[in-house]
Image (cartoon, rainbow, N blue to C red):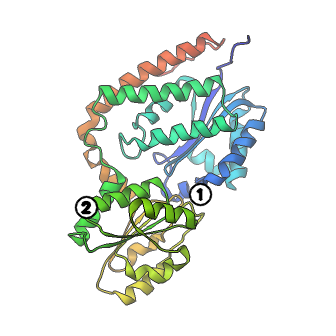
Amino acid sequence: MSKPNLQSLFVLGCSHHETPLEVRERLALSPDKIPALLQELRECRDFSESLVLSTCNRLEIYVHARNENAQQSIREILCRSLNIKNELLVAHAYRLHNLSAIQHAFSLAAGLDSQILGETEILGQMKQALATAQEFENTGSILNRLFEKSFQTAKIVRTQTGIDKGQVSIGNIAADLAKRIFGKLQNSRVLLIGSGEVGQRTAQALRNRGVQQLAVSSRTTQNAEHLAAQLDADHLPFEQIHKSLEQFDIVISSTAAPGLILRHEDFRAARRVRPAQPFFLIDLAMPRDLDPSLNKLENCYLYNLDDLAAIANENLARRNAECEQAHVLLNAQAWQLWLQLRRRSFMPIEKNQNV
C-alpha cells in the first residue's frame, strides 16, 4: 500500500481576525454554493483531498495538496466561486502549512480562535463541514484524521481547562442589551427573520428573559412554520415584513440572503407610525441583512456580530491563564498527530515550526 504524502497539508482562509466586516461580506459563501465549490476542488488535480469551512466569521479551505501549484489553484477556484479579484484574497487571506495547519484546526475546534472565546458552535460547524465534504467524497485519510482528532482535542481542552467558564453567547448578550433598552421584556414584541442557529438561540434567550410575543419569518415558508412551532411563535409571511415593522420592538435577522433585506427607508416609514418607541435591531447575518445606516436613525439601536462579540469578550483578560493552558494542551496534541502522520509519509520535519 502506498503511503500518503503529507508535504502539503494546507489551509487558506479569511476570518474576523484579519478581515473587516465589509470585506467578510464579499467573501461570504452561501450554503447553496458549497456543493459546486467542493466539486470543483475535487476535480482539481493539484490536491487529493479538500474541505470547505464556511461560517459567519470565517471562510477556510483545507487541502492535502499534490504539488506546489495548490495554493494558486485554490485562489483561482475561490475567486471564480465568489466573483472576486485575487488581490482581495492576497490582502486578507492567511496561509497555514502542515504543523501550523494542524495547530490551527485544533485551536479552532476548541473555540480558542473564535470571535467569542470558548464558544462551542464552531465545533458543530466543523463537524458539518467534514460531513458535507465526506458526502461529496472530497476527504480521505489525512483530512478525516485531522478533523476527527481536532474534535477529540477540543473535548480534552474543555475538560481540563476553564476556557468556557464565564463564556457568554451572542444570544445572551443581545438579550441583556434588549433588557437595558426596554426594561421588562414581557410586553416587547420580537420578530425573528431567518432560521439560522444563532438567531434561534437569540430568540430563545429573549424568551428566557420574559418575551412572550414572538413572530418568525423566513424566505422559505416551510422553514418559518417549522421554527415557529418549535419556538411557540407566530408565523409572519416574508412578503409582509416591510409593512409590519411598526408592530415590533426587537428585530433579529439571520438569513442567508445575498444582500440587504431591510433598508433605512423601511424603518423610517415604521418610525412615523411609532416615533417615540425605540427599535432594537440585531443583525446576525453574513453578509449583513440590515442597512448599516440604520444606526443614524433616531431611536434605532443596531448591533451586528462584531459589536456583540466585542461586548462578550470584555472579560477576556480574566481568562488569559486558561487560554495559555489550553494552547499548551492542544499544541502537544497537534505535535503528536503531526508525528503520526509523518510516520505514514516521507515528509521531513520543517524548520522554524513553532510547537
Looking at the image, is mark 1 or mark 2 earlier in the sequence? 1
> Is label 2 in a helix, a strand or a loop?
loop
Residue that appears at 58% across and 47% down: 91
Residue that appears at 52% across and 74% down: 237
Image quarter where the C terminus lies is top left
From the top left corner, tell me how far across and down residue 63 is, in percent: 65, 32
Examine the rendered structure and indicate whether residue 276 appears above or below residue 23: below
From the top left corner, tell me how far across and down residue 243 is, in percent: 48, 83
Residue that appears at 48% across and 81% down: 266
Label annotation for residue 10? none
Viewer-closest of 293 and 344: 344
The outermost residue toward the bottom is 272
The answer to whether residue 305 is seen in the rendering is: no
Label annotation for residue 209? 2
Amino acid at circle 1: Arg
Residue that appears at 35% across and 58% down: 204
Mark 1–mark 2 Cα distance, whole angstroms, equals 35 Å
Tally of numbered tags: 2
Q: Residues within 10 Å of mark 1 (few under 14, many from 20)?
A: some
The answer to whether residue 86 is seen in the rendering is: yes
Q: Residues within 10 Å of mark 2 (few under 14, many from 20)?
A: some
Q: From the image, tell me which residue sits under label 1.
A: 26
> Is label 1 in a helix, a strand or a loop?
helix
Amino acid at circle 2: Arg
Viewer-closest of 220 and 59: 220
From the top left corner, tell me how far across and down residue 2 is, in percent: 73, 12
**Which quarter of the figure has residue 140?**
top right
From the top left corner, tell me how far across and down residue 174 is, in percent: 32, 60
**Which quarter of the figure has residue 62?**
top right
In the figure, is residue 46 to the left or right of 120? right
